[in-house]
Image (cartoon, helix red, strand yellow):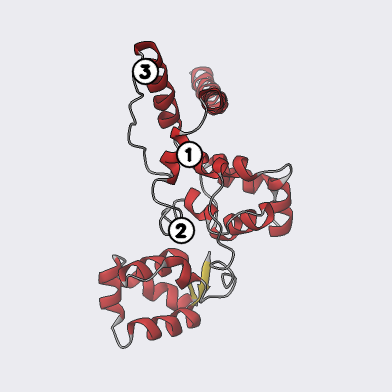
C-alpha cells in the first residue's frame, strides 16, 4: 500500500525541515533512487514512510495517522487479546514450551522458560486471522476490499497481507487496528503498543491442555501444507519422467 507523494513531502518537510532527500535516505537505509522513483510516480510506499519515521525516532503508528486512510489508526489501537498474543508465538516455540512442561512434570521440577522467536513467524498472518475470526472474516474482508477470495488466500498462504487488508481485517473483527500489522512484520509489538513480555506471559500462563490443543492445531495445518508440497513435487517428478 502507498500514500500520496504530496502528503509524504508535506509530512517530511514538517519533521525533517530542510534535510536533503539524500540525507534522509541514508539515515533510513533506503536507496535515493527508490525514493525518487516513488515521488515521480506520485505514490510512496508504507515501507518508505516507516523507515524514515524510525530513522527520525518518530512513532510509526503516529506517523501513519498523518496520511489518508490511516487517520484513526492510533485512536483504534487496543491491547491484543490472549488469542492474538498466542498467534504470534511460533510453532517451534509452542512445541518447545510443551516439551519443557512435560520434562518438568516428569522430573518434578520447574519448567525452563526458553526465549521466544520474533513474532513474525512463518504462519503468523494465518494464525492471527484465525485468532480474530468469528466466522466469515476472510469472506467479509475480500468482499469489502473488492478482491477475489482466492487472491486473499494467496496472500495468506504466502504469509503476507497488505496494510490495508490487515487494518480492514482488524476493524471488522473489532480488535486493535495496528495488531494485524504485527502479524505481517510491518510493525514490531512495541511499535503497536503491545506490553513488553506480553507474548511470553500469555504462553507461560496458558493451561497445558490448551497449549497442547493449540500445538495440535498448528501441527495439523503444517501437516496439510507439507502434504500438498509433497504431492506437487511428486506431480512434477511424474511429468519429467513421462517426458523421458
Q: Position of residue 20 (x, y in %)?
A: 28, 83
The span from disc 2 to disc 3 (Cα, nearest Å) is 33 Å
Give the label on residue 193, or none.
2
Q: Position of residue 70 (x, y in %)?
A: 56, 70
Residue for badge 3: 104
Q: Position of residue 85 (x, y in %)?
A: 50, 43
- Between 123 and 114, the one lying in front of the other is 114
Q: Residue at x 36, y 24 (%)?
A: 111
Q: Position of residue 35 (x, y in %)?
A: 37, 72
Q: Residue at x 35, y 23 (%)?
A: 110
Q: Are marks 3 and 1 in contact (CB under 8 Å)?
A: no
Nearer the camera: disc 2 or disc 3: 3
Which mark is first along the chain, 1 or 3? Answer: 3
Q: Are marks 1 and 2 in contact (CB under 8 Å)?
A: no
Which mark is first along the chain, 2 or 1? Answer: 2
- Between 80 and 25, the one lying in front of the other is 80
Residue for badge 1: 202
Q: Secondary structure at mark 2?
A: loop
Question: Does 228 sit left or right of 204 as displayed?
Answer: right
- Between 14 and 1, the one lying in front of the other is 14
Amino acid at each position: 500500500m502507498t500514500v500520496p507523494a504530496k502528503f509524504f513531502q508535506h509530512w517530511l518537510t514538517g519533521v525533517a525541515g530542510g534535510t536533503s532527500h539524500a540525507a534522509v535516505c541514508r539515515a533510513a537505509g533506503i536507496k535515493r533512487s527508490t525514493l525518487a522513483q516513488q515521488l515521480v510516480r506520485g505514490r510512496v510506499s508504507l515501507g518508505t514512510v516507516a523507515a524514515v519515521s524510525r530513522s527520525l525516532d518518530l512513532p510509526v503508528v503516529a506517523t501513519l495517522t498523518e496520511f489518508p486512510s490511516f487517520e484513526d489508526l492510533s485512536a483504534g489501537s487496543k491491547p491484543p487479546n490472549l488469542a492474538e498474543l498466542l498467534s504470534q508465538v511460533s510453532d517451534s516455540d509452542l512445541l518447545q514450551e510443551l516439551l519443557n512442561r512435560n520434562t518438568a512434570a516428569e522430573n518434578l521440577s520447574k519448567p525452563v522458560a526458553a526465549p521466544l522467536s520474533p513474532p513474525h513467524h512463518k504462519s503468523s498472518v494465518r494464525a492471527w486471522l484465525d485468532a480474530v475470526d468469528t466466522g466469515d472474516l476472510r469472506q467479509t474482508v475480500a468482499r469489502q476490499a473488492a478482491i477475489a477470495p482466492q487472491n486473499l488466500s494467496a496472500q495468506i498462504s504466502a504469509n503476507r497481507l497488505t496494510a490495508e487488508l490487515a487494518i480492514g481485517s482488524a476493524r471488522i473483527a473489532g480488535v486493535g487496528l495496528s495488531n494485524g500489522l504485527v502479524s505481517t512484520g510491518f510493525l514490531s509489538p512495541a511499535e503497536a503498543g503491545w506490553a513488553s513480555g506480553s507474548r511470553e506471559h500469555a504462553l507461560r500462563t496458558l493451561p497445558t491442555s490448551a497449549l497442547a490443543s493449540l500445538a495440535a492445531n498448528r501441527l495439523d495445518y503444517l501437516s496439510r501444507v507439507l502434504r500438498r508440497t509433497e504431492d506437487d513435487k511428486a506431480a512434477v517428478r511424474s511429468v519429467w519422467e513421462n517426458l523421458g
